[in-house]
Image: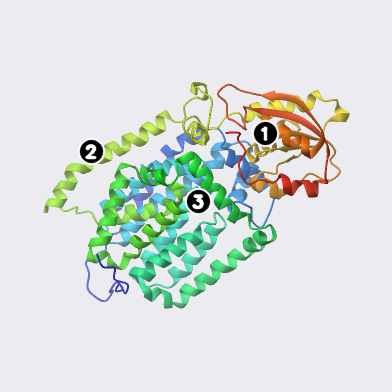
Amino acid sequence: MVLNAAAPAVDLEEPSPPRPPFATVWVLLLAALSGAFLAIPTLRYNYFGDELYFVAAGAHRSLTYADQGVLIPLIAHLADSIAPGSAPLLRLPAVLMMMGAVVISAAVAHELGGSRTAQLVAALAYGVSPLAATQAVQLSTFSFDATLQAAIIWLMIRWIRTREDRLLIALGIVAAIDLQVKWFIPTILLCLAGGVLVAGPREVLWRRALWQSVAIFAVSALPALWWQNEHGWPALAMSKVIGAEQDAAGGGPLWCMPQMIGLCGLLGGLLAGWAFWCLATQRWLRPYLFMLVASALLVIVVLVGHGRPYYTAGFLPVLFGIGAASLPYSVNDRGGRLLRMVAGPVVVLSLAIIAILLVTLPQPPSRAHGAIRDQAGFSTRTMVYGSSGWSELTAKVADAYRELPEAQRPKVIVAQNYWQAAALQNFGRDYDLPPVYSPNRGFGYFGPPPSDSGPVLYVGLDSAESTLQRQFASVTVLSHLNVPNGFPGVNNDISISICRGPVHPWAELWPDMMDLRLPLGI
């Protein structure tokens, strides 16, 4: 295969058959059905730790955060303000973004001249994929990032067909919004730029609108860059932490690739594979060959960087659309007849797989057996049974707090990990608990307790006591929380202590306590 670096522009002057209309009603209906069904697990899963953190972070206004942009915490804070304690409402934006990705899949097929059938095939592939189920089940940076990435690539594909430079401006605006969600978007843009440099169309590089778009994106990055510089660039350190977590929970790069493929589902996986083949071999897709190169670059970056498998998610709606638009639907050729033979079983199996996931997940936590020994077990337990233990943790801390004489009750709580802190801040409202602090991950950048706070109620792993003895003049363990088959760091292996006399002022002690790693004791 020879990549044509100077891929020709789509010639709009040559006569071409009328473009099939966009199947607006059917695509929106399919997106709505996908949203309705994939929202079912949001009613059953307990809060995930990061969701609680987003709510807590939204209450601490900032230009940006140590581990992500400002948009998701703001949305979480708004949702919690409208309906405090409502996990389904908190997750509604994630469901809507998943529905948006369904529409984008169809829109890509439409841009490539795909029929209404092709558009619906692309939309269906995304709507029944494990990726869509994962995207909709919780509010996360990934929920927004995947759809915004797909929108960026769709705008690029549409520009190639129409050469309307306003689309490049829109691309810059969407990228700027995505930067307020997750800082992975510069990597995506670099992969796309690499694809254009290698496979074309290079003409876009000389468009004034593109550089205006770059300027929009650069200006939007300035607040985050300033904040990161002021705080020692924690985002760079977080990339190493995430890599270590992915290796421990997901098996490292060796197992990352199968997980990427698994997110596609059966129908989506076949369409993505077909899209790669057609991009490499079909002349009519040559203007879009940059997608093949960009996809390869992104996979390499994720594997080498020990990234998470869903980092490639934004490319999947586009690949589904390309694959669907490239299928031979005519019954007058061999390919079309073969397609009709296999289409039914593939669709039925894809629907069956997603239906099984919807019916069986999450399992009741009472069915979980055996202690969690490692990160992989923690991740699997969370996926199958959901998170649990927040109420037990909060109640146990509240009991320890209330059992102290009123005059001796600490004015602040310090939690060892940010999930604990977020849970105590959110659920502690019902127990009138004092303000909560944590030196862990993004929570640590919210600042230390006040210098005159006095004794603190410390919540952390049993193993943290030896470290506390070096940091405080006196450490008294008040109680323990050990729920059989519970989550380490949440409702298992937990000690609640009162710590008096920090050996240094909080302003000096806090930086030494701060840690971007999630301490779970496993």
> Do residues under tags 2 and 1 come within 8 Å of each other at their CB atoms?
no
- Residue 18 in sight here: no
Inter-mark Cα distance, 2 to 1: 47 Å
Way the structure is coloured: rainbow
Q: Position of residue 378 (x, y in %)?
A: 52, 33
Q: Which mark is residue 143?
A: none
Say whether disc 2 or disc 1 marks the residue closer to the N-terminus. Answer: 2
Disc 1 marks which amino acid? Phe
Q: Which residue position is annotated with label 1?
A: 427
Which of the image's four quarters has the C terminus? top right
Whether residue 209 can be seen here: yes
Q: Secondary structure at mark 2?
A: helix
Residue 314: x and y in percent read: 42, 54
The residue lying toward the viewer, choosing from 348 and 412, is 412
Residue at image point 55% right, 54% down: 181
- Ranked by sequence position, the earlier of labels 2 and 3 is 3
From the viewer's perspective, tell me whether residue 453 is left or right of residue 204.
Answer: right
State the image coordinates of residue 396 (x, y, percent, origin top left).
Answer: 70, 25
The mark tally for this picture is: 3
Quarter of the N terminus within the rendering: bottom left
Instruction: Identify the mark at residue 345; answer none if there is no mark.
Output: 2
Label 2 neighbour load within 10 Å: few <14, some 14-19, many 20+: few
Q: Secondary structure at mark 3?
A: helix
- Dot 3 or dot 1: first in sequence order is 3
Q: Residue at x 50, y 51 (%)?
A: 144
Amino acid type, callout 2:
Pro
From the image, tell me which residue sits under label 3. 144
The reply, left or right, for residue 178 in relation to residue 284 is: right
Marks 2/3: CA distance?
32 Å
Check disc 3 and give the amino acid type.
Phe
